[in-house]
Amino acid sequence: MMIRSMGVLALISVAGVAAAAPYVSLFEQDVKSYLKDVTIERDGPTFAATDWVYGRVIVDEGDTTSPAPQDYLTQVARLKALEDGVLNTNFLCVEVNQGLVPGPVPYSKFYAHGRAGYLVNLVRDPMLRDDRDAMAGLQLALWEVAYDDTNGNPDNLLSDRFRLYSSGQFNATARGWANTFLSWSVGQSAGYYYYKSPSVRDNQGVAHQDLVSTVPSPAAFLPFAVGLVSAMRRRRK
């Protein structure tokens, strides 16, 4: 994601040809029903530099807004924000090319269901949520699903609509987590909340960042995830 009013991140156009196939968004793919309108206000401590993992990615939406692939310097992590004044520590970002503004700003809240929901719900895992590299990998995996899986592309962090600028971006641990989460999520699906930003633009001239967050899920989900995390940690030792 790009952060506004906390130091604007670099946005650089790169040469490329827009994809011929129509672009399908995660919103179009997964959203099932409208729930209500809410306000979201980002939580300042979220943006401490030590919480973030930095790297460059390329996104090709292939639409009239971004007709060619775009190169972004990004910061990835689990987000904390106030939803109608109540702290929610389980937010992740949907769009690479939109910024977060201080808020509070209006959003429409929807119930959604799909592969992305499986990934989103991993943010609640106590063995993952405070691991900076794991959360960075989870955000990268979500972007891969949002941009590529929804458009029929195979999982690959180095090709298609969403890709790392180079194989060395972010760090090896975060990339390893991203690939692990993608492999876990194949054939999986779960419910989650999708927060759609308004179509109107704010006074900074940018649209707001769409967000996703967790919903209550069966108690069996977390033991399953914890078992996978434990097994992975043993392999890393």
Image: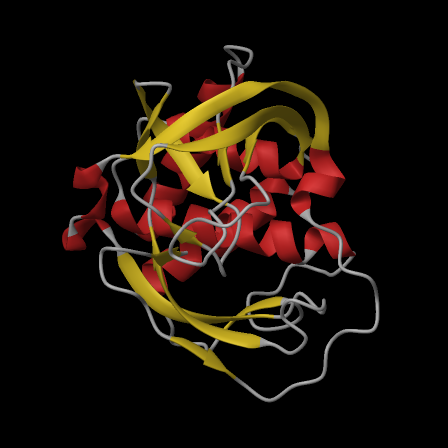
Q: Specify the quadrant of the image occupied by residue 62.
A: bottom right
- Relative to 197, does residue 49 appear above or below in the rendering? below
Q: Position of residue 175 (x, y in %)?
A: 42, 61
Q: Pick out the residue farthest to the front.
A: 203
Where is residue 134? Give x, y as percent.
35, 46
Is 147 on the left-hand or right-hand side of 97? right
Q: Nearer the viewer, residue 27 or 124?
A: 27
Residue furthest toward the top?
A: 219
Left or right: residue 219 versus residue 127 is: right
Residue at horizontal 26%, vertical 47%? 132
Give the colouring mode of the picture: secondary structure
Give the mark count: 0
Vertical placement of residue 18 versus 132, above or below:
below
**Any part of residue 150 in sight:** yes
Q: Is residue 9 left or right of residue 110?
A: left
25 is higher (above) or lower (below) than 11: above
Q: Quadrant of the N terminus?
A: bottom left
Q: Residue at x 42, y 58 (%)?
A: 176
Query: In this view, which residue lies farthest toward the bottom?
Result: 15
Residue located 74% across and 61% down the image:
153
Q: Residue furthest right?
A: 21
Left or right relative to 193: residue 187: right
Q: Position of residue 207 (x, y in %)?
A: 50, 52
Which residue shows up at 39% across the image and 26% down it? Answer: 124
In percent of width and height, residue 203 lies at: 39, 52
Q: From where the camera sits, is residue 171 visible?
A: no
